[in-house]
């Protein structure tokens, strides 16, 4: 994913510096070449040797270190660099970069940058809330620096608060997303995912085996193209993708409300959710004793959220999913027409390596003009990427994208 990319990793003097060791490993695993630049304080927390061994490159700690050679260390590092990441970034480092100070190897390197800069702050929660720091962050954001928000949780100083370095996975995803095609920057994409649960009583419900994997992959693919993503998710075991707004829902009615709340701002709506088609007419909010459960359960249809979205005015691309076992293209095309969609993605549930809970899928993409694209069995992330590419094409045709 990061093959051929040259990344400089700045490490500053925070207790979270040890987490940068794992970041180097992950970046290397993804194929990046990594040069680590440390502040003096950072070397008090982790030895430069650790980073040198893992990155397989010398670590720059002193701006005059390479001075005896032909090149100047901090300038040489920034030559043909693809990205600089500072993780963890202390309040001090952020303040210096905002003020244009270059008094050590790391700040001098950052001063000479000609590539995107990503910073992942880590500090005590009161320090993080400090107005001087917040205004430095705002200023740097205006200059194009991308920030990975710290997370809430226990801090090294013994309290709990908002200041922990974001987890390694989120940091890596953000780095990867910088290299993605940012064609959807400024656009909002609404995605539904997972199953819904329709309660019978306090402990029983009607649902289906959807795990949400396909929808979460679609949300991540939209985010990687620069979109603002709202993911409306039924109950799943999955961690929402980083930098995606996730709205958790339970029932079809709740999913419908969340979709209605966000659909008007969306330029593309992708409904991967396996919405329950039926719900019990009368659900008890207590646990009903089995002897008291009637022999038949009266059901009613849930609202068709996708169909309803198709009737809401506005210029957006609307994409549905169809889980089929028979006459796949015909059935999916019928759904596309009935629900007034721009595109439908049909799963062949009987194909090996496709459908619910699998890490792979095999789909047929059908658009409104009748173009049918069959994809082989692929990881869901790759299927998601194909789907997004098709959506971008449709958005261009519809004039939603230039
Ligand atoms: N969908 C929805 N609201 C519902 C039901 C489905 O938004 N109440 C959406 C799904 O997210 C998916 C598509 O509609 O994008 C699936 O269409 P649907 O006709 O519901 O498929 P099935 O339920 O599989 O229909 P059938 O059982 O008739 O094949």
Image: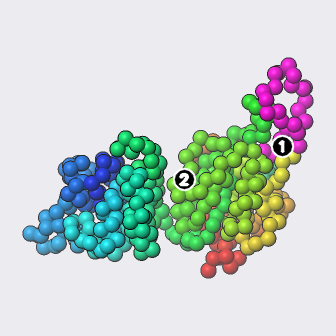
Q: Position of residue 98 (x, y in %)?
A: 34, 71
Examine the rendering and report whether any part of residue 357 can be seen.
Answer: yes
Label 2 beta carbon less than 8 Å to ligand 1: no
Q: Which residue is mark 2?
A: 241
Q: Residue 80, labelled with which disc?
A: none
Locate residue 41: give its quadrant: bottom left
**2 or 1: tag closer to the N-terminus:** 2
Secondary element at tag 2 = loop
Q: Position of residue 10 (x, y in %)?
A: 30, 60
Above-or-below relation of 396 to 91: below
Is residue 136 inside the magenta stretch? no
Residue drawn 83% across and 52% down?
303
Secondary element at tag 1 = strand
Q: Which quadrant: the N terminus? A: bottom left
| 71 or 103, nearer to the observer | 103
Above-or-below relation of 346 to 77: above
């Amino acid at each position: 994913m990061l093959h051929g990319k040259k990344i400089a990793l700045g490490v500053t003097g925070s207790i979270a510096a040890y987490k940068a060791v794992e970041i180097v490993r992950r970046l290397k695993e993804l194929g990046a070449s990594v040069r680590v630049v440390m502040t003096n304080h950072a070397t008090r927390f982790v030895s430069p040797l650790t980073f040198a061994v893992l990155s397989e490159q010398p670590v720059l700690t002193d701006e005059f270190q390479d001075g005896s050679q032909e090149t100047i260390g901090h300038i040489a590092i920034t030559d043909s660099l693809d990205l600089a990441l500072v993780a963890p970034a202390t309040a001090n480092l952020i303040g210096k970069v905002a003020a244009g100070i270059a008094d050590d190897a790391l700040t001098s390197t950052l001063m000479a940058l000609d590539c995107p800069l990503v910073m992942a702050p880590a500090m005590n929660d009161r320090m993080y809330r400090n107005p001087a720091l917040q205004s430095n962050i705002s200023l740097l954001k205006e200059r194009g620096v991308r920030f990975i928000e710290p997370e809430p949780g226990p801090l090294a100083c013994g309290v709990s608060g908002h200041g922990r370095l974001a987890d390694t996975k989120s940091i890596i995803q953000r780095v990867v997303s910088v290299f993605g095609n940012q064609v959807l920057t400024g656009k909002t994409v609404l995605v539904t995912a997972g199953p819904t649960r329709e309660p019978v009583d306090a402990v029983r419900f009607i649902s289906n085996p959807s795990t949400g994997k396909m929808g979460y992959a679609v949300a991540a693919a939209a985010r990687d193209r620069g979109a603002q993503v709202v993911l409306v998710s039924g109950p799943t075991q999955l961690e929402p993708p980083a930098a995606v707004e996730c709205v958790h829902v339970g029932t079809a009615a709740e999913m419908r409300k969340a979709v209605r709340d966000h659909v008007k701002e969306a330029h593309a709506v992708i409904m991967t959710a396996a919405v329950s088609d039926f719900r019990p007419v009368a659900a008890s909010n207590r646990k009903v004793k089995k002897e008291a459960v009637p022999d038949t359960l009266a059901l009613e249809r849930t609202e068709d959220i996708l169909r309803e979205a198709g009737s809401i005015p506005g210029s957006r691309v609307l994409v549905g999913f169809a889980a089929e076992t028979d006459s796949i293209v015909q059935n999916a095309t019928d759904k596309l027409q009935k629900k007034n969609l721009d595109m439908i993605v049909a799963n062949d549930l009987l194909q090996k390596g496709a459908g619910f809970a699998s890490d792979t899928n095999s789909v047929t993409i059908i658009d409104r003009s009748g173009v049918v694209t069959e994809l082989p069995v692929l990881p869901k992330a790759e299927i998601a990427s194909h789907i997004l590419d098709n959506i971008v094409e449709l958005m261009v045709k519809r004039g939603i994208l230039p």
